[in-house]
Amino acid sequence: MKQTGRTMLEIPLMWEWPVERCLDLIREIEGEALLEQYRADGRGLILLAPHLGNWELAGLYFSSRYKMAALYSPPHLPEFEDYMIQVRGRLGSELVRGDRRGLARLIGLLREGGVAGILPDQSPRGKGNAYAPFFGMEVRTMTLVAKLLQKSGAAVLITYAERLPDAEGFRIVIRECEPGLDDADPVVATGALNASVEQCVREIPTQYQWEYKRM
């Protein structure tokens, strides 16, 4: 609960503080060589950023380095959407809705060698999704990641911004995903997606947004 409270207090700061002040909170980057390795071949790259640590800071960090688009679900308050797009896109990151038009945009960007950021543990809306295990429970899981990988030929990594103890700042962590995210079988693909998220959550379980509904 303490970590959740810290996240709730930090997010408005990440939206309102100058970008430089936010990025100054990053003390180290783990897995940067892995990121550069995947970028070197010219393929597009999908960065999965679950609701772990401070995902808004992770998004700022990568949009400060790459031309990228980030998938989002429209908020329940329509008047809040323009503000969210403005603050998340202030470094030039393109905000793309999670609909058919957004999917086409992301595929085009990835085929051009761009970077796409996705919150992989969002509760998906509409049809075309599957249930897959996550910490021993069957939860609704997006099939979007598998579709993007299949249609774009992009690579995929998972990342999060870990909150360091004693208010020392953050560590950006970049990791390999579990194999099978691009499998044609949606059960296999969504299972690999949840396993990738679960592997990261197990490293810092207190910093995960456990209250997020996915049933």
Image (cartoon, helix red, strand yellow):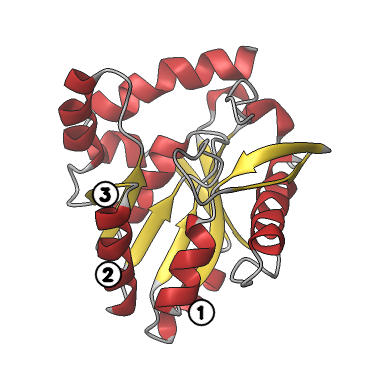
Q: List the residue tagged with mark 3.
A: 96
Please provide percent x and percent y for residue 55.
46, 38
* Residue 47 in sight here: yes
Q: Farthest residue toward the bottom?
A: 41
Q: State the CA–CA distance, disc 1 to disc 2.
A: 19 Å
Residue 145 relative to residue 188: left or right: left
Local secondary structure at mark 1: helix
Please provide percent x and percent y for residue 5.
54, 13
Q: State the CA–CA distance, disc 1 to disc 3.
A: 26 Å
Residue 134 relative to residue 87: left or right: right
Please provide percent x and percent y for residue 140.
62, 39
User: Mark 1 belongs to which amino acid?
Assistant: Gln
Sequence-wise first label, 1 or 3: 1
* Residue 66 in sight here: no
Q: List the residue tagged with mark 2.
A: 109
Q: Nearer the viewer, residue 211 or 185?
A: 185
Local secondary structure at mark 2: helix
Q: Is residue 198 above or below residue 163?
A: below
User: Mark 3 belongs to which amino acid?
Assistant: Val
What label does residue 37 carry, if any?
1
Q: Nearer the viewer, residue 94 or 34?
A: 94
Rendering quarter of residue 21: top left
Q: Is residue 195 above or below residue 41?
A: above
Sequence-wise first label, 2 or 3: 3
User: Mark 2 belongs to which amino acid?
Assistant: Leu
Q: Quadrant of the C terminus?
A: top right
Q: Is residue 120 above or below residue 42?
A: above
Q: Residues within 10 Å of mark 3 (few under 14, many from 20)?
A: many
Rendering quarter of residue 166: top right
Residue 31 relative to residue 127: left or right: right
Q: State the CA–CA distance, disc 2 to disc 3.
A: 11 Å
